[in-house]
Image (cartoon, rainbow, N blue to C red):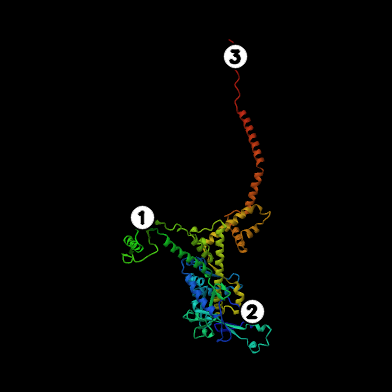
Protein backbone atom coordinates (compact mmCIF):
# COMPACT_ATOMS: atom_id res chain seq x y z
CA UNK A 1 0.00 0.00 0.00
CA UNK A 2 1.07 3.53 -0.64
CA UNK A 3 0.65 6.32 1.86
CA UNK A 4 0.04 9.81 0.59
CA UNK A 5 -0.47 12.59 3.12
CA UNK A 6 -1.74 10.07 5.61
CA UNK A 7 -4.25 8.55 3.17
CA UNK A 8 -3.80 4.85 2.39
CA UNK A 9 -4.07 3.88 -1.25
CA UNK A 10 -4.28 0.17 -2.05
CA UNK A 11 -2.17 -1.01 -4.94
CA UNK A 12 -3.01 -4.70 -5.23
CA UNK A 13 -1.36 -6.01 -2.11
CA UNK A 14 1.95 -7.27 -3.48
CA UNK A 15 4.23 -8.89 -0.92
CA UNK A 16 7.61 -7.33 -0.53
CA UNK A 17 10.55 -9.65 -0.81
CA UNK A 18 13.21 -10.17 1.81
CA UNK A 19 16.78 -9.02 1.50
CA UNK A 20 19.82 -8.91 3.79
CA UNK A 21 20.69 -5.50 2.26
CA UNK A 22 19.25 -2.44 4.02
CA UNK A 23 17.22 0.03 1.92
CA UNK A 24 19.27 2.67 0.18
CA UNK A 25 18.56 6.35 0.03
CA UNK A 26 20.06 9.02 -2.17
CA UNK A 27 19.51 11.60 0.55
CA UNK A 28 20.95 12.11 4.01
CA UNK A 29 18.78 10.28 6.53
CA UNK A 30 18.88 10.03 10.31
CA UNK A 31 17.95 6.44 11.17
CA UNK A 32 15.85 5.64 14.21
CA UNK A 33 15.83 2.07 15.52
CA UNK A 34 12.81 0.75 17.38
CA UNK A 35 10.04 3.07 18.46
CA UNK A 36 9.80 6.76 18.56
CA UNK A 37 12.11 6.87 21.52
CA UNK A 38 14.91 4.70 20.20
CA UNK A 39 18.47 5.75 19.56
CA UNK A 40 20.05 7.51 16.65
CA UNK A 41 22.75 6.19 14.42
CA UNK A 42 25.38 8.80 13.52
CA UNK A 43 23.13 11.75 14.16
CA UNK A 44 26.03 14.03 15.09
CA UNK A 45 27.73 13.48 11.76
CA UNK A 46 24.52 14.13 9.87
CA UNK A 47 23.20 17.25 11.55
CA UNK A 48 26.34 19.02 12.66
CA UNK A 49 28.46 18.50 9.57
CA UNK A 50 25.63 19.22 7.16
CA UNK A 51 24.89 22.49 8.93
CA UNK A 52 28.51 23.59 8.76
CA UNK A 53 28.81 22.58 5.11
CA UNK A 54 25.66 24.46 4.13
CA UNK A 55 26.96 27.60 5.83
CA UNK A 56 30.30 27.19 4.06
CA UNK A 57 28.62 26.67 0.68
CA UNK A 58 26.60 29.85 1.10
CA UNK A 59 29.69 31.83 2.13
CA UNK A 60 31.54 30.47 -0.92
CA UNK A 61 28.78 31.62 -3.26
CA UNK A 62 29.44 35.24 -2.20
CA UNK A 63 33.05 35.13 -3.44
CA UNK A 64 33.33 37.11 -6.72
CA UNK A 65 34.92 34.32 -8.81
CA UNK A 66 32.52 31.66 -7.52
CA UNK A 67 29.54 33.97 -7.96
CA UNK A 68 30.49 34.64 -11.58
CA UNK A 69 30.92 30.91 -12.26
CA UNK A 70 27.55 30.08 -10.66
CA UNK A 71 25.83 32.77 -12.71
CA UNK A 72 27.37 31.37 -15.90
CA UNK A 73 26.15 27.85 -15.05
CA UNK A 74 22.65 28.98 -14.03
CA UNK A 75 22.31 31.18 -17.12
CA UNK A 76 23.15 28.17 -19.26
CA UNK A 77 20.72 26.03 -17.25
CA UNK A 78 17.80 28.45 -17.46
CA UNK A 79 17.36 30.37 -20.69
CA UNK A 80 14.97 33.29 -20.43
CA UNK A 81 12.84 33.98 -23.46
CA UNK A 82 10.01 36.43 -23.90
CA UNK A 83 7.88 33.98 -25.86
CA UNK A 84 8.66 30.47 -24.56
CA UNK A 85 8.60 28.98 -21.06
CA UNK A 86 11.92 27.89 -19.51
CA UNK A 87 10.76 24.25 -19.42
CA UNK A 88 8.02 22.26 -21.13
CA UNK A 89 6.75 18.73 -20.65
CA UNK A 90 7.26 16.22 -23.47
CA UNK A 91 4.72 13.39 -23.77
CA UNK A 92 5.33 12.13 -27.31
CA UNK A 93 6.57 8.75 -26.02
CA UNK A 94 3.72 8.31 -23.54
CA UNK A 95 1.18 5.70 -24.63
CA UNK A 96 -1.89 7.52 -23.39
CA UNK A 97 -4.97 9.10 -24.92
CA UNK A 98 -5.04 12.70 -26.04
CA UNK A 99 -7.40 13.64 -23.22
CA UNK A 100 -5.07 12.29 -20.51
CA UNK A 101 -2.07 14.00 -22.13
CA UNK A 102 -3.91 17.31 -22.17
CA UNK A 103 -4.72 16.94 -18.46
CA UNK A 104 -1.09 16.15 -17.68
CA UNK A 105 0.08 19.23 -19.61
CA UNK A 106 -2.47 21.41 -17.84
CA UNK A 107 -1.42 20.14 -14.41
CA UNK A 108 2.24 20.70 -15.24
CA UNK A 109 1.50 24.28 -16.30
CA UNK A 110 -0.34 24.72 -13.00
CA UNK A 111 2.71 23.43 -11.11
CA UNK A 112 4.95 25.94 -12.90
CA UNK A 113 2.55 28.72 -11.93
CA UNK A 114 2.60 27.63 -8.26
CA UNK A 115 6.42 27.66 -8.34
CA UNK A 116 6.34 30.93 -10.28
CA UNK A 117 9.03 29.24 -12.30
CA UNK A 118 8.95 31.68 -15.17
CA UNK A 119 10.13 34.55 -12.93
CA UNK A 120 11.96 32.74 -10.12
CA UNK A 121 13.66 29.98 -12.11
CA UNK A 122 17.11 31.59 -11.87
CA UNK A 123 16.92 31.97 -8.07
CA UNK A 124 15.46 28.47 -7.56
CA UNK A 125 18.20 26.80 -9.61
CA UNK A 126 20.89 28.92 -7.96
CA UNK A 127 19.78 27.99 -4.44
CA UNK A 128 19.62 24.32 -5.44
CA UNK A 129 23.10 24.46 -6.99
CA UNK A 130 24.65 26.18 -3.95
CA UNK A 131 22.93 24.15 -1.20
CA UNK A 132 22.90 20.89 -3.12
CA UNK A 133 19.23 20.35 -2.15
CA UNK A 134 15.87 22.04 -2.26
CA UNK A 135 12.67 21.36 -0.30
CA UNK A 136 9.05 22.27 -1.04
CA UNK A 137 6.03 21.60 1.16
CA UNK A 138 3.03 20.41 -0.83
CA UNK A 139 0.07 22.14 0.84
CA UNK A 140 -3.32 20.43 0.34
CA UNK A 141 -6.78 20.67 1.79
CA UNK A 142 -7.10 17.61 4.06
CA UNK A 143 -10.88 17.81 3.91
CA UNK A 144 -10.83 17.89 0.12
CA UNK A 145 -7.66 16.19 -1.14
CA UNK A 146 -9.11 15.79 -4.64
CA UNK A 147 -8.58 19.50 -5.16
CA UNK A 148 -4.88 18.73 -5.52
CA UNK A 149 -1.94 20.80 -4.38
CA UNK A 150 -3.00 24.29 -3.37
CA UNK A 151 0.43 25.79 -2.70
CA UNK A 152 4.13 24.93 -2.87
CA UNK A 153 6.09 26.52 -0.02
CA UNK A 154 9.85 26.60 -0.08
CA UNK A 155 11.64 25.34 3.06
CA UNK A 156 15.12 26.41 4.07
CA UNK A 157 17.52 23.45 4.00
CA UNK A 158 18.81 24.42 7.47
CA UNK A 159 15.35 23.94 9.00
CA UNK A 160 14.42 20.42 7.87
CA UNK A 161 15.85 16.92 8.34
CA UNK A 162 14.74 13.54 7.06
CA UNK A 163 14.25 10.73 9.57
CA UNK A 164 13.82 7.01 8.92
CA UNK A 165 12.17 5.00 11.70
CA UNK A 166 12.28 1.22 11.66
CA UNK A 167 9.22 -0.82 12.51
CA UNK A 168 10.44 -4.05 14.11
CA UNK A 169 9.20 -7.25 12.49
CA UNK A 170 6.97 -8.85 15.17
CA UNK A 171 7.81 -12.37 13.95
CA UNK A 172 11.50 -11.81 14.47
CA UNK A 173 11.02 -9.99 17.75
CA UNK A 174 8.83 -12.79 19.18
CA UNK A 175 11.18 -15.66 18.42
CA UNK A 176 14.64 -14.55 17.23
CA UNK A 177 16.09 -18.09 17.51
CA UNK A 178 13.52 -19.53 15.10
CA UNK A 179 14.58 -17.26 12.22
CA UNK A 180 18.31 -17.52 12.90
CA UNK A 181 20.14 -18.59 9.75
CA UNK A 182 17.22 -17.70 7.46
CA UNK A 183 16.52 -14.67 5.30
CA UNK A 184 14.25 -13.26 8.00
CA UNK A 185 17.28 -12.80 10.26
CA UNK A 186 18.54 -10.05 7.95
CA UNK A 187 15.16 -8.70 6.96
CA UNK A 188 15.27 -4.99 7.61
CA UNK A 189 11.54 -4.80 8.15
CA UNK A 190 9.33 -1.86 7.35
CA UNK A 191 10.40 1.73 7.60
CA UNK A 192 8.45 4.89 8.18
CA UNK A 193 10.13 7.95 6.71
CA UNK A 194 9.17 11.46 7.70
CA UNK A 195 10.66 14.92 8.00
CA UNK A 196 11.32 17.03 11.06
CA UNK A 197 10.76 20.74 10.51
CA UNK A 198 12.34 23.13 12.99
CA UNK A 199 11.19 26.75 12.40
CA UNK A 200 14.19 28.13 14.30
CA UNK A 201 16.58 25.95 12.34
CA UNK A 202 18.91 23.18 13.41
CA UNK A 203 21.82 25.55 13.97
CA UNK A 204 21.29 25.73 17.72
CA UNK A 205 20.85 22.72 19.92
CA UNK A 206 20.45 20.43 16.94
CA UNK A 207 24.08 20.99 16.01
CA UNK A 208 25.16 19.35 19.25
CA UNK A 209 25.54 15.59 19.74
CA UNK A 210 22.29 13.68 20.22
CA UNK A 211 21.74 10.57 22.20
CA UNK A 212 18.05 9.85 21.82
CA UNK A 213 15.26 10.12 19.34
CA UNK A 214 13.43 12.50 21.64
CA UNK A 215 15.50 15.25 20.04
CA UNK A 216 13.33 14.83 16.96
CA UNK A 217 10.09 14.67 18.91
CA UNK A 218 7.24 17.09 18.46
CA UNK A 219 8.67 19.21 21.26
CA UNK A 220 11.69 20.15 19.15
CA UNK A 221 10.14 20.07 15.71
CA UNK A 222 7.13 19.35 13.57
CA UNK A 223 6.73 15.96 11.93
CA UNK A 224 5.77 16.09 8.27
CA UNK A 225 4.92 13.08 6.10
CA UNK A 226 7.58 12.26 3.51
CA UNK A 227 5.02 12.43 0.69
CA UNK A 228 4.18 15.98 1.69
CA UNK A 229 7.73 17.15 0.91
CA UNK A 230 9.03 17.49 -2.62
CA UNK A 231 12.82 17.44 -2.66
CA UNK A 232 15.76 16.84 -4.95
CA UNK A 233 19.43 16.78 -4.02
CA UNK A 234 22.57 17.22 -6.08
CA UNK A 235 23.29 13.53 -6.41
CA UNK A 236 26.81 14.09 -5.03
CA UNK A 237 27.14 11.95 -1.92
CA UNK A 238 29.78 11.47 0.75
CA UNK A 239 29.51 7.69 0.96
CA UNK A 240 31.58 7.54 4.13
CA UNK A 241 29.46 9.95 6.16
CA UNK A 242 26.20 9.34 4.27
CA UNK A 243 25.12 12.89 3.56
CA UNK A 244 24.56 14.97 0.47
CA UNK A 245 27.09 17.45 -0.82
CA UNK A 246 26.79 20.53 -2.93
CA UNK A 247 28.25 21.01 -6.40
CA UNK A 248 30.57 23.55 -4.76
CA UNK A 249 32.12 20.97 -2.45
CA UNK A 250 35.11 20.08 -4.63
CA UNK A 251 35.87 23.78 -5.11
CA UNK A 252 36.48 24.43 -1.39
CA UNK A 253 40.21 23.74 -1.52
CA UNK A 254 40.72 25.63 -4.80
CA UNK A 255 38.89 28.67 -3.45
CA UNK A 256 40.91 28.70 -0.22
CA UNK A 257 44.15 28.44 -2.18
CA UNK A 258 43.11 31.31 -4.45
CA UNK A 259 42.22 33.46 -1.44
CA UNK A 260 45.60 32.78 0.23
CA UNK A 261 47.53 33.53 -2.95
CA UNK A 262 45.67 36.81 -3.48
CA UNK A 263 46.13 37.90 0.14
CA UNK A 264 49.84 37.08 0.12
CA UNK A 265 50.18 38.94 -3.18
CA UNK A 266 48.68 42.08 -1.66
CA UNK A 267 50.98 41.90 1.37
CA UNK A 268 54.03 41.38 -0.86
CA UNK A 269 53.12 44.31 -3.08
CA UNK A 270 52.53 46.64 -0.16
CA UNK A 271 55.83 45.73 1.44
CA UNK A 272 58.01 45.56 -1.65
CA UNK A 273 56.54 48.11 -4.02
CA UNK A 274 57.95 51.41 -2.57
CA UNK A 275 61.60 52.39 -2.71
CA UNK A 276 63.28 52.90 0.66
CA UNK A 277 66.34 54.96 1.54
CA UNK A 278 69.30 54.14 3.79
CA UNK A 279 70.84 57.04 5.70
CA UNK A 280 74.42 56.46 6.89
CA UNK A 281 75.03 59.10 9.61
CA UNK A 282 78.62 59.93 10.59
CA UNK A 283 78.81 59.88 14.42
CA UNK A 284 82.58 60.41 14.69
CA UNK A 285 84.13 59.13 17.91
CA UNK A 286 81.07 59.58 20.06
CA UNK A 287 80.37 56.92 22.65
CA UNK A 288 77.67 54.41 21.91
CA UNK A 289 74.95 56.07 24.04
CA UNK A 290 75.64 59.56 22.68
CA UNK A 291 75.93 58.18 19.13
CA UNK A 292 72.47 56.64 19.41
CA UNK A 293 71.06 59.89 20.84
CA UNK A 294 72.62 61.87 18.01
CA UNK A 295 71.16 59.44 15.47
CA UNK A 296 67.67 59.84 16.96
CA UNK A 297 67.99 63.62 16.88
CA UNK A 298 68.93 63.53 13.19
CA UNK A 299 66.00 61.18 12.46
CA UNK A 300 63.53 63.44 14.26
CA UNK A 301 64.90 66.49 12.47
CA UNK A 302 64.70 65.23 8.93
CA UNK A 303 61.95 62.67 9.01
CA UNK A 304 58.62 63.98 7.82
CA UNK A 305 55.57 61.91 8.68
CA UNK A 306 52.66 64.06 7.61
CA UNK A 307 49.50 62.11 6.86
CA UNK A 308 46.41 63.32 5.00
CA UNK A 309 43.14 62.43 6.72
CA UNK A 310 40.58 61.85 3.98
CA UNK A 311 37.63 61.84 6.42
CA UNK A 312 38.28 65.31 7.88
CA UNK A 313 40.46 66.89 5.18
CA UNK A 314 43.20 67.66 7.73
CA UNK A 315 46.92 66.94 7.75
CA UNK A 316 48.12 65.17 10.86
CA UNK A 317 51.57 64.28 12.16
CA UNK A 318 52.05 60.55 12.77
CA UNK A 319 55.67 60.51 13.90
CA UNK A 320 54.87 58.23 16.81
CA UNK A 321 53.64 55.46 14.48
CA UNK A 322 56.23 53.17 12.94
CA UNK A 323 55.60 51.26 9.75
CA UNK A 324 57.33 48.63 7.65
CA UNK A 325 57.77 51.12 4.83
CA UNK A 326 60.03 53.55 6.70
CA UNK A 327 63.61 54.39 5.79
CA UNK A 328 66.67 52.89 7.48
CA UNK A 329 69.00 55.07 9.66
CA UNK A 330 72.42 53.55 10.37
CA UNK A 331 75.38 55.08 12.27
CA UNK A 332 78.85 55.21 10.74
CA UNK A 333 82.08 55.64 12.74
CA UNK A 334 84.97 57.97 12.02
CA UNK A 335 87.16 56.69 9.24
CA UNK A 336 84.24 55.80 7.04
CA UNK A 337 82.98 57.63 4.03
CA UNK A 338 81.01 60.14 6.09
CA UNK A 339 77.28 60.75 5.80
CA UNK A 340 75.74 58.95 2.83
CA UNK A 341 72.25 58.33 1.45
CA UNK A 342 71.51 55.31 -0.77
CA UNK A 343 68.27 53.87 -2.17
CA UNK A 344 66.94 50.30 -1.96
CA UNK A 345 65.05 49.28 -5.13
CA UNK A 346 61.43 48.15 -4.91
CA UNK A 347 60.04 44.80 -6.00
CA UNK A 348 61.07 43.83 -9.50
CA UNK A 349 58.59 41.00 -10.24
CA UNK A 350 55.34 42.61 -9.18
CA UNK A 351 53.74 41.98 -12.58
CA UNK A 352 53.98 38.19 -12.32
CA UNK A 353 50.48 36.79 -11.96
CA UNK A 354 50.96 33.28 -13.32
CA UNK A 355 50.29 31.67 -9.93
CA UNK A 356 47.03 33.62 -9.52
CA UNK A 357 45.89 32.67 -13.02
CA UNK A 358 46.75 29.02 -12.33
CA UNK A 359 44.63 28.80 -9.18
CA UNK A 360 41.80 30.75 -10.82
CA UNK A 361 41.79 28.28 -13.72
CA UNK A 362 41.90 25.43 -11.20
CA UNK A 363 38.84 26.90 -9.46
CA UNK A 364 36.88 27.11 -12.70
CA UNK A 365 37.81 23.53 -13.59
CA UNK A 366 36.61 22.33 -10.19
CA UNK A 367 33.23 23.92 -10.97
CA UNK A 368 33.07 22.17 -14.40
CA UNK A 369 33.15 25.54 -16.11
CA UNK A 370 35.29 26.08 -19.25
CA UNK A 371 37.97 28.63 -18.26
CA UNK A 372 37.76 30.14 -21.74
CA UNK A 373 34.34 31.58 -20.85
CA UNK A 374 35.67 33.78 -18.06
CA UNK A 375 39.17 34.69 -19.18
CA UNK A 376 40.04 37.85 -21.07
CA UNK A 377 41.55 35.86 -23.94
CA UNK A 378 38.16 34.85 -25.31
CA UNK A 379 35.87 37.85 -24.98
CA UNK A 380 34.00 37.18 -28.21
CA UNK A 381 31.55 34.29 -28.47
CA UNK A 382 33.01 31.84 -30.96
CA UNK A 383 32.69 28.13 -31.46
CA UNK A 384 35.85 27.98 -33.48
CA UNK A 385 37.03 25.50 -36.04
CA UNK A 386 39.43 23.80 -33.71
CA UNK A 387 38.30 20.86 -31.65
CA UNK A 388 39.57 22.31 -28.34
CA UNK A 389 36.94 25.02 -27.90
CA UNK A 390 34.27 22.75 -29.24
CA UNK A 391 35.33 20.00 -26.84
CA UNK A 392 35.15 22.30 -23.81
CA UNK A 393 31.75 23.58 -24.80
CA UNK A 394 30.50 20.08 -25.53
CA UNK A 395 31.68 18.86 -22.14
CA UNK A 396 30.00 21.83 -20.47
CA UNK A 397 26.74 21.27 -22.34
CA UNK A 398 26.71 17.62 -21.21
CA UNK A 399 27.23 18.79 -17.61
CA UNK A 400 24.27 21.15 -17.94
CA UNK A 401 22.24 18.27 -19.37
CA UNK A 402 23.01 16.16 -16.29
CA UNK A 403 21.96 19.01 -14.02
CA UNK A 404 18.66 19.35 -15.88
CA UNK A 405 18.00 15.61 -15.64
CA UNK A 406 18.66 15.72 -11.90
CA UNK A 407 16.50 18.75 -11.21
CA UNK A 408 13.63 17.27 -13.24
CA UNK A 409 13.06 14.83 -10.35
CA UNK A 410 11.42 17.71 -8.51
CA UNK A 411 8.85 18.10 -11.29
CA UNK A 412 8.38 14.34 -11.30
CA UNK A 413 7.58 14.24 -7.58
CA UNK A 414 5.14 17.16 -7.63
CA UNK A 415 3.45 15.98 -10.84
CA UNK A 416 2.96 12.48 -9.43
CA UNK A 417 1.24 13.83 -6.33
CA UNK A 418 -0.94 16.21 -8.33
CA UNK A 419 -2.11 13.58 -10.83
CA UNK A 420 -2.91 11.00 -8.13
CA UNK A 421 -4.79 13.45 -5.91
CA UNK A 422 -6.91 14.73 -8.79
CA UNK A 423 -7.63 11.20 -9.98
CA UNK A 424 -6.08 11.62 -13.42
CA UNK A 425 -4.09 8.39 -12.98
CA UNK A 426 -3.96 5.53 -10.50
CA UNK A 427 -0.90 5.12 -8.23
CA UNK A 428 0.08 1.84 -9.90
CA UNK A 429 0.08 3.54 -13.34
CA UNK A 430 2.80 6.00 -12.45
CA UNK A 431 5.63 3.45 -12.46
CA UNK A 432 4.89 2.67 -16.10
CA UNK A 433 4.43 6.33 -17.06
CA UNK A 434 7.35 8.10 -15.42
CA UNK A 435 9.99 6.73 -17.79
CA UNK A 436 8.12 8.18 -20.77
CA UNK A 437 7.65 11.67 -19.34
CA UNK A 438 10.43 14.05 -20.32
CA UNK A 439 11.08 17.72 -19.65
CA UNK A 440 12.47 19.95 -22.39
CA UNK A 441 14.42 22.96 -21.19
CA UNK A 442 14.87 25.95 -23.44
CA UNK A 443 18.36 26.13 -24.96
CA UNK A 444 20.44 29.16 -25.70
CA UNK A 445 19.21 29.99 -29.18
CA UNK A 446 22.38 31.75 -30.27
CA UNK A 447 24.72 28.98 -29.26
CA UNK A 448 22.39 26.27 -30.50
CA UNK A 449 21.97 28.02 -33.85
CA UNK A 450 25.71 28.35 -34.38
CA UNK A 451 26.27 24.73 -33.44
CA UNK A 452 23.54 23.52 -35.80
CA UNK A 453 24.90 25.63 -38.66
CA UNK A 454 28.41 24.28 -38.26
CA UNK A 455 27.20 20.68 -38.05
CA UNK A 456 24.97 21.12 -41.11
CA UNK A 457 27.84 22.70 -43.06
CA UNK A 458 30.06 19.70 -42.33
CA UNK A 459 27.29 17.27 -43.35
CA UNK A 460 26.62 19.10 -46.63
CA UNK A 461 30.36 19.13 -47.41
CA UNK A 462 30.47 15.38 -46.83
CA UNK A 463 27.41 14.84 -49.04
CA UNK A 464 29.07 16.85 -51.82
CA UNK A 465 32.14 14.65 -51.64
CA UNK A 466 30.01 11.47 -51.67
CA UNK A 467 27.73 12.57 -54.53
CA UNK A 468 29.84 10.98 -57.36
CA UNK A 469 29.49 7.61 -55.63
CA UNK A 470 25.68 7.70 -55.38
CA UNK A 471 24.31 4.73 -57.29
CA UNK A 472 27.67 2.97 -57.17
CA UNK A 473 28.52 2.58 -53.48
CA UNK A 474 25.78 4.56 -51.70
CA UNK A 475 22.07 5.08 -52.15
CA UNK A 476 20.24 8.37 -51.80
CA UNK A 477 18.27 7.07 -48.81
CA UNK A 478 21.47 5.97 -47.04
CA UNK A 479 22.99 9.46 -47.41
CA UNK A 480 19.82 11.16 -46.17
CA UNK A 481 19.49 8.92 -43.12
CA UNK A 482 23.11 8.25 -42.14
CA UNK A 483 24.91 11.42 -43.26
CA UNK A 484 22.23 14.11 -43.05
CA UNK A 485 20.72 12.35 -40.00
CA UNK A 486 17.12 12.78 -41.12
CA UNK A 487 14.59 11.00 -38.97
CA UNK A 488 11.62 9.09 -40.36
CA UNK A 489 9.32 12.01 -39.66
CA UNK A 490 11.70 14.53 -41.26
CA UNK A 491 12.25 12.19 -44.22
CA UNK A 492 8.55 12.04 -45.06
CA UNK A 493 7.97 15.72 -44.41
CA UNK A 494 10.87 16.78 -46.67
CA UNK A 495 9.66 14.49 -49.47
CA UNK A 496 6.20 16.03 -49.20
CA UNK A 497 7.62 19.55 -49.32
CA UNK A 498 9.87 18.77 -52.31
CA UNK A 499 6.90 17.33 -54.27
CA UNK A 500 4.92 20.47 -53.50
CA UNK A 501 7.76 22.69 -54.76
CA UNK A 502 8.06 20.68 -58.01
CA UNK A 503 4.30 20.81 -58.63
CA UNK A 504 4.24 24.55 -58.10
CA UNK A 505 7.12 25.07 -60.54
CA UNK A 506 9.43 26.62 -57.95
CA UNK A 507 12.14 24.01 -58.60
CA UNK A 508 12.92 21.58 -61.43
CA UNK A 509 12.29 17.91 -60.99
CA UNK A 510 15.60 16.12 -60.26
CA UNK A 511 14.61 13.52 -62.89
CA UNK A 512 14.39 16.24 -65.54
CA UNK A 513 17.65 17.70 -64.33
CA UNK A 514 19.26 14.29 -64.70
CA UNK A 515 17.89 13.94 -68.28
CA UNK A 516 19.19 17.36 -69.18
CA UNK A 517 22.58 16.50 -67.71
CA UNK A 518 22.64 13.28 -69.74
CA UNK A 519 21.83 15.22 -72.93
CA UNK A 520 24.58 17.68 -72.14
CA UNK A 521 27.05 14.83 -71.64
CA UNK A 522 25.97 13.25 -74.95
CA UNK A 523 26.34 16.54 -76.79
CA UNK A 524 29.76 16.97 -75.26
CA UNK A 525 30.75 13.46 -76.45
CA UNK A 526 29.63 14.17 -80.07
CA UNK A 527 30.94 17.71 -80.09
CA UNK A 528 34.07 16.95 -82.22
CA UNK A 529 31.97 15.30 -84.90
CA UNK A 530 29.48 18.14 -84.79
CA UNK A 531 32.31 20.65 -85.12
CA UNK A 532 33.77 18.76 -88.15
CA UNK A 533 30.36 18.56 -89.80
CA UNK A 534 29.83 22.24 -89.21
CA UNK A 535 33.25 22.96 -90.75
CA UNK A 536 32.45 20.86 -93.83
CA UNK A 537 29.12 22.58 -94.18
CA UNK A 538 30.78 25.94 -93.91
CA UNK A 539 33.37 25.04 -96.59
CA UNK A 540 30.65 23.77 -98.93
CA UNK A 541 28.70 26.98 -98.46
CA UNK A 542 31.78 29.05 -99.19
CA UNK A 543 32.46 27.07 -102.43
CA UNK A 544 28.86 27.45 -103.56
CA UNK A 545 29.01 31.12 -102.82
CA UNK A 546 32.17 31.46 -104.86
CA UNK A 547 30.54 29.75 -107.83
CA UNK A 548 27.56 32.04 -107.62
CA UNK A 549 29.83 35.02 -107.55
CA UNK A 550 31.59 33.79 -110.63
CA UNK A 551 28.28 33.54 -112.47
CA UNK A 552 27.35 37.07 -111.57
CA UNK A 553 30.53 38.58 -112.99
CA UNK A 554 29.95 40.50 -116.32
CA UNK A 555 31.39 39.03 -119.54
CA UNK A 556 34.58 40.72 -120.79
CA UNK A 557 34.17 43.23 -123.65
CA UNK A 558 35.42 42.08 -127.12
CA UNK A 559 38.74 43.47 -128.15
CA UNK A 560 38.76 46.23 -130.84
CA UNK A 561 40.65 45.48 -134.09
CA UNK A 562 43.82 47.40 -134.58
CA UNK A 563 43.67 49.95 -137.47
CA UNK A 564 46.38 49.97 -140.14
CA UNK A 565 48.09 53.15 -140.58
Residue 170 shows in this picture: yes
Residue bearing mark 2: 21
Residue 82 shows in this picture: no
Q: In front here: 100 or 61?
A: 61
Residue bearing mark 1: 338
Mark 2 residue element: loop
Q: Residues within 10 Å of mark 3 (few under 14, many from 20)?
A: few
Residue 175 picture quarter = bottom right
Q: Residues within 10 Å of mark 2 (few under 14, many from 20)?
A: few
Residue 440 picture quarter = bottom right
Report how far apart the C-alphas of labels 1 and 3 lie in the structure: 146 Å
What residue sits 68% from the left and 83% below the top?
182
Residue bearing mark 3: 562
Q: Residues within 10 Å of mark 1 (few under 14, many from 20)?
A: some
* Residue 499, label in figure: none
Q: Position of residue 124 (x, y in %)?
A: 49, 72
Mark earlier in primary sequence (1, 3): 1
Q: Is residue 313 above or below residue 424?
A: above
Q: Position of residue 354 (x, y in %)?
A: 49, 59
446 displayed left or right of 432: left
Mark earlier in primary sequence (2, 1): 2
Q: Is residue 429 above or below residue 66?
A: below
Amino acid sequence: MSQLFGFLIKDGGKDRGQSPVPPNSDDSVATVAGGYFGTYVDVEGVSKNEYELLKRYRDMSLHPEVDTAIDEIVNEFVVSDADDAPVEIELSNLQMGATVKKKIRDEFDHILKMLNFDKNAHQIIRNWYVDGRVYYHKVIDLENPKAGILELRNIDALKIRKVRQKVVNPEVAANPQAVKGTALQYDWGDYVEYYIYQPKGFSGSMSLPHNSASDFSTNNGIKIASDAIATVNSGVMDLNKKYSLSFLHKAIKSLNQLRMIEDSLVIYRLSRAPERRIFYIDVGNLPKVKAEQYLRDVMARYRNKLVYDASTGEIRDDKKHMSMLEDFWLPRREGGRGTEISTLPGGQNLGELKDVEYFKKKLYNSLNLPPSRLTDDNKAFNLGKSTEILRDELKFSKFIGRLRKRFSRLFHDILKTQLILKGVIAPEDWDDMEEHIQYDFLFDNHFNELKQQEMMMQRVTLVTQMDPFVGKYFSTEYIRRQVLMQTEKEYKEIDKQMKSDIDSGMVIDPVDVTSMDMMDRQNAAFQPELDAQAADDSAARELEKAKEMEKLKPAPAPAKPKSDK
